[in-house]
Amino acid sequence: MPSYRLRFKGCAHNSTEYRNQTNNYVINLDQPPKQRWIALVMDYKKEISDLIENIKKNVDDLFGAKLIQLVEVYMPYLAKTLPKIYYEEMVGISEAIDTQLGEVVLYNLFYEFFSVCTSVIVESPSGSIYHGRNLDFGLFMGWSVKNKTWVTSNFLRKMVVTLDFQKNGTTIYKSVNFAGYIGILTGMKPNIFSFSVNERFRLNGGFVGITEWIIGFRHQNWLAVLTREVMEQAKTYTSAQKMLSNPKLVAPVYFILAGTKSSQGCIITRGRGSFDLWRIGEKRYRQNGTWYQVQTNYDHWKNPPFYDDRQFPAEFCIEELGQDDPVKTLQGVLSTRPVLNKLTIYSAVMQASSGKLDMWLQDCNDPCWPW
């Protein structure tokens, strides 16, 4: 076995308490946009403010102070170019926690660039579809030598919430969010579909898209806006697939989409203007079975780099843990190092057909890989 795989020490079995450890909030879509997030963000006012300061410090360290100066100038203007509903939601958040609108916009765009995730779709022998994901966040955003942890990841663990987005008192969709973020990175529309978002590393990435947006080329879609629109507008798995595949994007990304029926699972590899569709049942060249899909942060038709191979451990453990109990398999895979690593903030398992979304916070104790 190649040396870079030595960080994989075997599959996890019953290593974590798999239960929701966070607060749940209702986002009432019948309310005016400015009012929807007030109760939530007021409860997390300090945490949001602390994280924004941490983001600014790390952006300074990575890119220089001039970038933050540009953010302070352009972000409020950029916010006004977003669809009115989402602009007003961010205005409501900034007013509630008494911070600049530009900083709230920065906080919401932040999630487009620094996530390093693993998503898995599994089909049971009876044809039921299950969807698991680890959300890893904070790469290069401050490493604590003393604690051997990512500073930003520690901030974010305190801010994880589950949300019920409701109309007329009925839950339309659910999500796992960070307090103050208005988009959807992990979500489910009961009885229709679930989806997750993984970052895709490309040279022609989000920074190019932001620059184009600022100078007036605004035919692309922001991740936060598109994901909300999909959750609110898509009525079927197929329509969600189309909505995630076709629009131009500010930043490249992977969309992982799972439905409620046999064969309803796919990985949508998105460029800013292109897409590739990999359906469950179509075997990836390195995997054995066709009943599962694994997506990390690299194109499925390529080998991952030697320094970040979460694909092999995930596929190995799926095969070892088996197809008969998909929830147990996903729990084990998501808690297997290095699928579980120092960046991992939470894990989630979803089944759209039952409307069930389970999540649990993760904190990888040593020995644990940084990513």
Image (cartoon, grey):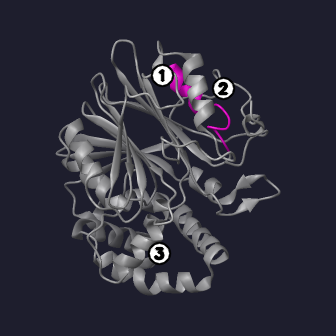
Q: Quadrant of the N terminus?
A: top right
Against 97, is 177 above or below? above
Which residue in the protein does label 3 denote?
103
Q: Is residue 335 something one can see in this rendering?
A: no
- Circle 1: residue type: Val
Task: Name the residue located 69 percent from the left edge and 47 percent from the top edge.
Answer: 307
Examine the rendered structure and indicate whether residue 123 appears above or below residue 340: above
The kind of residue tagged 3 is Glu
Mark 3 vs mark 1, foreground winner is 1
Residue designated by label 1? 327
Work out how far the residue at label 2 is from the one at label 1, CA to CA, in angstroms.
Answer: 14 Å
Residue 329 part of the magenta-drawn span: yes
On the image, the x and y values in percent for residue 324 come to 47, 12
Disc sitting over residue 15 in the figure: 2
Please give the range of residues in magenta: 327-341
For the point 54% across and 82% down, which residue is it?
A: 67
Q: Dots 2 and 1: beta carbons under 8 Å? A: no
The x, y position of residue 305, in whole percent, is 63, 47
> Dot 3, how many residues are within 10 Å of its Cα: few (below 14), some (14-19), or many (20+)?
many
